[in-house]
Image: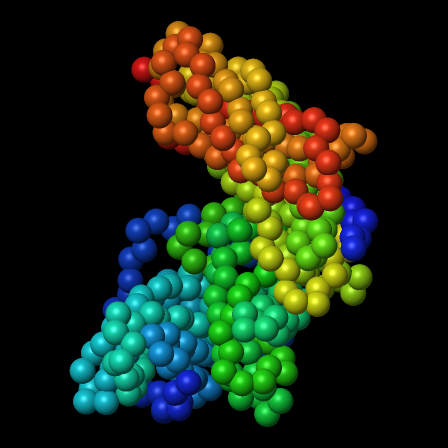
């Protein structure tokens, strides 16, 4: 895999109560589908894992709920933190299913939420965060508890493949953010991981956190993340705990990274520091790709992540090109973005797709709207069947051919064979930029049918 990097030309509460203890329940959960197998490569542990020599025969020890737990209520929001630790040196804790309960002062249950962690590695500490939104903010939470079930798997010489680096806390006014990177020593690329984010003050007391999804972590590489968090005190440091879940899938090997290429790209920042721009990609295969994902990471000069932007691609037709302008997360106050890189995770093959090129032919495009912030796109259904719906993607270019912005929209109105329709697409580009040319694509999506 090639990670390409470019430089950007800059432009201008309630009190905390004690958590009630809980004993593990007996029994082992059965997941609906196990989509990954536990990695067996000899990888380095995270700071939360302890490196030990597995005993030849080890008596199984129960998963430990540590006493470093926390919860806080702020109006209708309740934030909780729990820490588990696997005390075994040669056994993986697997299929951990847990339920967190909220109770009022009289012990009546208010609300609960269940989730899972697929594996906790030998010697590994796992922090778990959960955020509740109460239906009635006047209800006061009196206590919080957790119960769980799990199983074991034998796993000698196995270490957790992920390490967290470059974590940075951004105060960002009333909307604090945490950014960082998760590196992988695995030979496989994993998708859909959970990141539990926990914030500490100078006395090492928990003062908040959050949860984020790691879309994918490339084999032998890293993935950046940016997430809003809730904080209830001054933050001095951050811990992040990546976790496998039942939604995690994986790609073996590295040959697939060349299946989608980048033909053109340009990102810059506007006067408020928000990234603008886009890219043009190409399917290098003779096969339809579904569920691909573009991931753009933005950095400051110190290497801290300032923003990320994702763009799912429902369908990418064989040997076809498509222009995209991913929507970025607004950077935190004071962040100065100076560079970016792009990763594209190709999706699955769809060998039985009905068409090998889009049936929707784009005709006239024009910049419209009171503030020149809309592009009107006309496109015609050239297929002999009705197309049920379509996505429309737009890129804007300056006189030098640089991508300066764009946007996307969709129509769910059926498009009869031979009919021409019109769609207004809202676009974004920096104030002061002049649009010289426009390119648009009308494209099928997951829900498109041909009748």
Is residue 331 among what the camera can see?
yes
Q: In the image, 22: left or right of 358?
A: left
Residue at point 35% right, 64% down?
115
In the displayed structure, 177 sits above or below 139; it is above
**Horizontal relation, residue 82 to residue 150: left or right:** right
The image shows residue 402 at horizontal and vertical percentages of 76, 34
* x and y, in percent, of residue 351 in the image: 46, 22
Picture colour scheme: rainbow
When asked about the image quadrant of residue 2, the answer is top right
* Residue at x 78% of width, y 65% of height: 302
Residue closest to the eye, 108 or 181: 108
Image quarter (top left, top right, bottom left or bottom right) of the C terminus: top left
Quarter the N terminus occupies: top right
Residue under the point 48% across and 66% down? 211
Q: Residue furthest front?
A: 370
Query: Along the line of sight, which residue is nearer the eye, 329 or 95?
Result: 329
In this rendering, the count of numbered labels is 0
Q: Position of residue 423 (x, y in %)?
A: 47, 27
Residue 172 placed where, x, y %?
61, 70
Instruction: Between residue 356 and residue 269, name the one nearer to us.
Output: 269
Q: Is residue 194 above or below residue 75?
A: above
- Residue for point 44% across, 72% down: 129
Residue 186, visible in the rendered structure: no
- Please name whichever residue, 36 or 173, is drawn nearer the observer in this view of the structure: 173
């Amino acid at each position: 895999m090639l990670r390409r990097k470019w430089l950007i030309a800059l432009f201008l509460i309630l009190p905390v109560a004690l958590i009630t203890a809980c004993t593990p329940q007996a029994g082992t959960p059965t997941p609906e589908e196990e989509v990954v197998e536990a990695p067996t490569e000899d990888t380095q542990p995270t700071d939360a894992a302890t490196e030990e020599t597995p005993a030849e025969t080890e008596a199984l020890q129960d998963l430990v709920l540590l006493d470093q737990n926390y919860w806080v209520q702020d109006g209708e929001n309740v934030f909780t933190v729990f820490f588990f630790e696997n005390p075994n040196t040669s056994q993986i804790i697997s299929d951990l299913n847990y339920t967190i309960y909220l109770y009022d002062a009289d012990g009546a249950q208010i609300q609960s939420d269940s989730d899972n962690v697929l594996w906790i590695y030998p010697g590994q500490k796992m922090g778990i965060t959960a955020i509740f939104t109460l239906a009635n903010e006047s209800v006061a939470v009196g206590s919080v508890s957790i119960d769980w079930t799990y199983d074991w798997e034998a796993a000698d010489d196995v270490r957790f493949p992920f390490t967290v680096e470059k974590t940075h806390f951004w105060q960002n006014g009333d909307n604090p953010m945490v950014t960082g990177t998760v590196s992988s020593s695995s030979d496989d690329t994993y998708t859909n991981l959970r990141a539990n984010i926990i914030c500490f003050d100078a006395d090492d007391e928990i003062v908040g956190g959050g949860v984020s999804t790691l879309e994918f972590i490339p084999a032998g590489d890293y993935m950046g993340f940016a997430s809003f968090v809730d904080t209830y005190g001054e933050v001095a440091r951050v811990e992040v705990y990546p976790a496998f879940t039942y939604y995690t899938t994986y790609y073996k090997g590295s040959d697939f990274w060349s299946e989608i290429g980048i033909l053109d790209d340009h990102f810059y920042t506007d006067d408020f520091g928000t990234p603008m721009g886009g890219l043009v990609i190409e399917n290098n295969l003779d096969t339809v790709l579904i569920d691909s994902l573009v991931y753009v990471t933005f950095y400051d000069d110190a290497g801290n992540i300032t923003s990320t932007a994702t763009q799912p691609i429902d369908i990418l037709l064989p040997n076809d090109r498509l222009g995209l302008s991913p929507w970025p997360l607004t950077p935190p106050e004071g962040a100065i973005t100076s560079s970016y890189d792009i990763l594209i995770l190709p999706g699955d093959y769809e060998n039985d797709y009905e068409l090998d090129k889009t049936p929707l032919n784009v005709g006239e495009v024009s910049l419209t709207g009171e503030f020149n912030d809309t592009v009107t796109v006309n496109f015609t259904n050239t297929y002999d069947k009705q197309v049920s719906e379509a996505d429309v993607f737009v890129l804007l270019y300056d006189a030098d051919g640089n991508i300066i912005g764009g946007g996307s929209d969709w129509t769910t109105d059926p498009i009869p064979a031979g009919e021409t329709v019109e769609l207004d697409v809202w676009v974004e580009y920096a104030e002061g930029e002049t649009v010289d040319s426009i390119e648009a694509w009308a494209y099928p999506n997951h829900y498109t049918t041909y009748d």
